[in-house]
Image (spheres, coloured by chain):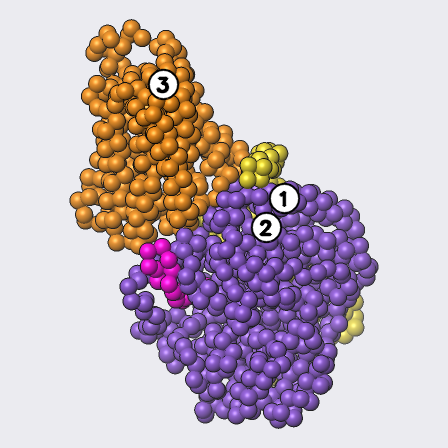
Amino acid sequence: MTTQELATQLQERFDAEQGEPDGLASPGWLSVTVCSDRLLDAIRWLWEDAGYRFLISAGSDLRRERGKYLVTNLFAQDEHGIYLAVHTEVDPEQPSIPSITPIVPAANWTERELRDMIGVVPEGHPDPRRLVLADDWPEDLYPLRWDVEHGIKPPPSDCQVPREPPPEGSSVVPLGPYFPSLEEPAYFRLFVEGEEVVGADYRGFYNHRGIEKMGCSVLTYNQIPFIAERICGICGCVHSTAYCQAVERAAGIEIPERAKYIRTIMLELERMQSHLLWLGIAGHIVGFDTVLMQTWRMREPIMWLSEKLSGNRRVYGGNIIGGVRLDIPTEVHQDVLDMLDKLETEWKALYKSIPGDTSLMARLRGTGVLPHELAVERCVVGPTARGSGVAIDTRLDHPYAAYDRLEFEKCVHDGCDNLSRTLVRLDETLVSIGLIRQALQQMPDGPILTQIDEDIPGGFEGFSGVEAPRGEVVHWVLTGDENRPTRWRPRAPTYANLQVVPPMLKGSQLADAPINIASFDPCFSCTDRMEVVDMRTDDEYD
Amino acid sequence: MAGYESGLKVTQMTLALNLVIALLLGPLMAGVVRKFVRARLHSRQGPPVLQPFYDICKLLGKEDLRSSSSPIVDFAPIVVMAATITAALLTPMGMRSPLAGHGDLIVFVNLVTIAVVGTVMVGLSSASPYSLIGAAREIMMHIMVEPVLVICLIVAAVKAQSLLFWHMAEGATAGGMSISMVIATIAMLMAMQAQIGKQPFDIAEAETEVMGGAFVELSGPRLALFQWASFARQIVYASMLAAIFIPWGIDLAPPWNLGAHLLKLLGVYVLVGIVDVVHPRIRVEQAIKFFVIIIVLSLIGLGLAIGGY
Amino acid sequence: MLLSKLRQALICLLAGKVTLSYPAKPRPPEEGFRGYPEVDVNKCIGCGACAAVCPARLIKIEDVDQTTRRMTRLLERCVFCGRCAEVCPEDAITMSKQFELTSDQARQDLTHVCEVFMATCKRCGRCYEPATPLDRIMEPGFRHDQIDRGGDRCPYPELRAPDSESPSTDEHDEHDEHLDEPVSAQVAQVVEAK
């Protein structure tokens, strides 16, 4: 199905108007507007009949521009390679919208976020508790509305987010908010009977840094990539790439070929170091510190190489709108290839030694089972999905950068357990090595940056998905007039994956809980990105 | 051997010797293993060999904070330390143990259990769920591991026809290895990791799961005492294994029998250290399955010993 | 099982000892590493290009009086992207190799204050805001040695003297020579906390 056929179908069935807000129709991308009465029908058709996967929803405050709130639900169809945005306009007098969570369970968090941040209430939501905002944030102050200033510190209110009560006969074991095996704050309340977990409740979003609000209120287009890169501590490059691609799409900027290859190489370097890092942490969590030490030793040359290529070990800072700032000159190609050869040798030795290790297998095989159906229903992404036999990979389904010119395959395992997820990551590291080799070979000469002479026009919509080490990163941008977006909505892969943790933990052993959570490679600070107040910021500097 | 009958002087010497081995050699051996086995296999520099002493000294010098008003927290560290030291004085460490005539296998097992009970009580006196889980796991592990120790020691006692450790050690040395003793030795070796709380049986303290288990609420001098007692306990178990189940070198002349014992200890420590490094932690129920097998194995050994093999 | 363990042990042992005695012997950063941004205060002309691109918005520019522009850098917020060094027209900013910036008084230790002596508009007494930073540098009157020429492009026409007239071409030539002179007339002063 092409986007044009889809547009016709949506028009016939649900009176969907194509091309709002900006009329951008390109292969692989469609944007339609549906009125809120027909929204549920349209969503039901997309979800149940047309095989669409839910990504995220975004609420934008367009009262200045159009006198409306705009709620955008984003979907992906992986077989046909289509991304779809379904917009619904909401009247500011009656800020509510029918909840799609009863149809699409994966929309649970994002609709709660809609209520917290914009103040559009999803009617009929099964769990309308506060999600993102802190407990002491006032009830009627919605941070992402344009008239709420960046950097305000309202007096604390005494709102208490109700907690799920534990089932009869079980006790509560807290995992967090600070827990030694979770490197970031996250608060799981495990309901435990003996050593068995019978349920779990999650309260997170402790790591708020106000990035979304900053992007829409104080930063400019070309400052955002560097802040976006800091959404995640491990896989930041995916965020800056996704953001730049989204803005480039909105503004119709074509970037040079060489820049595409450079982005691809940096993304794959990042994927390798992230997977190695994850394997080390997983080893540490099951008490196998030797794995931690050895995989991090193997990872170190990647970091040195990144430092050589980009000037920094982790946050490359290479992406800006229109291309990249850093070239990969021919002199360093040999260094890259040498590193890859060495890594491949060591990786294969490691790969051989793992499946025969019965004590490690005892911890990984059959634990943390995420059934295929649950993975599909909750729209999990990345190695988490591929470990449960869901064959989705943004690099192949919705190609970006230079991936459409490289040859590789999806790494899918269908064991649905911790072992499968481990094997997916092991395989992907080898695939990445191959991808970098191909990219280096094919990389054309030429400029790395398109000079942008005109201002980026306001009111356009841009979207991009990038396959991060942890799954699909999604950035949606609505351009604005003051040299900054009106709305910038990043979604980290953990946002989708983390929602499946409480149902997945049910019935597992308490001793397995840390590794089960870690097997998703959760990145809490990516998930928690949005909040209004940057506590570290001095007021005078804003 | 004649020296042992010369009375008080020797007893005082071995008393001092056992104390030094348990209290000073314990941390030192742990430091050696960390630096030369663990760090080596981790491809890293490793901490200084004396790091366990630095840690203990630092903790001893810290403010005495307590999270619970329960008197258990006052007494438990001292009781655990005292029980461990007494057990160390009962253990033959190269030479005849200083309290050899005053306590036997039964006293020893009781002392070891007192030490574990002290740890569990501290865990239970805290309100932290990690501490409670840690204490529960500690009991579970003790119930599974203790029978192995007891049955193996009984095998040695049956062979030596005595409940005194020195007789067992001498008997094993004189009688050579029998089938039952070989089986008991294997069982003891396999239980060793769990007895001293190393991987894959670091279940009760599992830092990444229950944050140190029963000790999570302890700090400062109390924690130091527990750690020190734990180092001493490792030496006691390793000595028991080295003296009774690896019966070589005890009949050498005095300085040499001590040397042989220390060598055997080092061997046990290195072996335990290597196994510790190359294993992940397993779950409680997996550990229980493993120990059921070992208990059955040691029971077979006991049957054979009673049968005279 | 045993084979697998031996393989693992072999991987470990073959690697040797790889960690460094870190604080004593740090690993030297690679060429092109972006560390602490160092500002050469003698080169800084106060154009503010760095403040305009800084993603962390850590450079505050304020004109404390008619002749002094103060640039305060709160470098504890720095994200080490190197954009400031990239856009600086005078190459006054370099990304050094220094990365050990931990401090128990980061706010004090990592605050860098640079005061640049600027010219004043002779007509209105204020600093004026040309369209871009580069225009500002080209603006007559921006540099201290050009004070005599300032004022004709002051953006506050209501304050302009009624008899204001364009400078003659002769004056232009005279001043073009001055443009090539070193920036000696600028007095730059650093107030840097220890």
Q: Is residue A204 magenta?
A: yes
Question: Which quadrant, please, contains the N terminus of chain A?
Answer: bottom right
The hue used for chain A is: purple
At x 31%, y 40%, the residue is: B142
The residue stretch that appears in magenta: A189-208
Observer-side mark, 1 or 2, equals 1
Indicate the chain on which mark 2 is placed. Answer: A
Q: Is residue B36 magenta?
A: no
CA distance separating discs 2 and 3: 50 Å
Give the x, y percent position of residue A405.
77, 64
Residue at 32% across, 32% down: B151
Task: Report whether residue A315 is seen.
Answer: no
Residue B37 is situated, as x and y percent measured from the top left of the image, at: 50, 31
Q: Colour of chain C?
A: yellow
The mark found on residue A276 in the picture is 2
**Nearest to viewer (mark 2 / mark 3):** 3
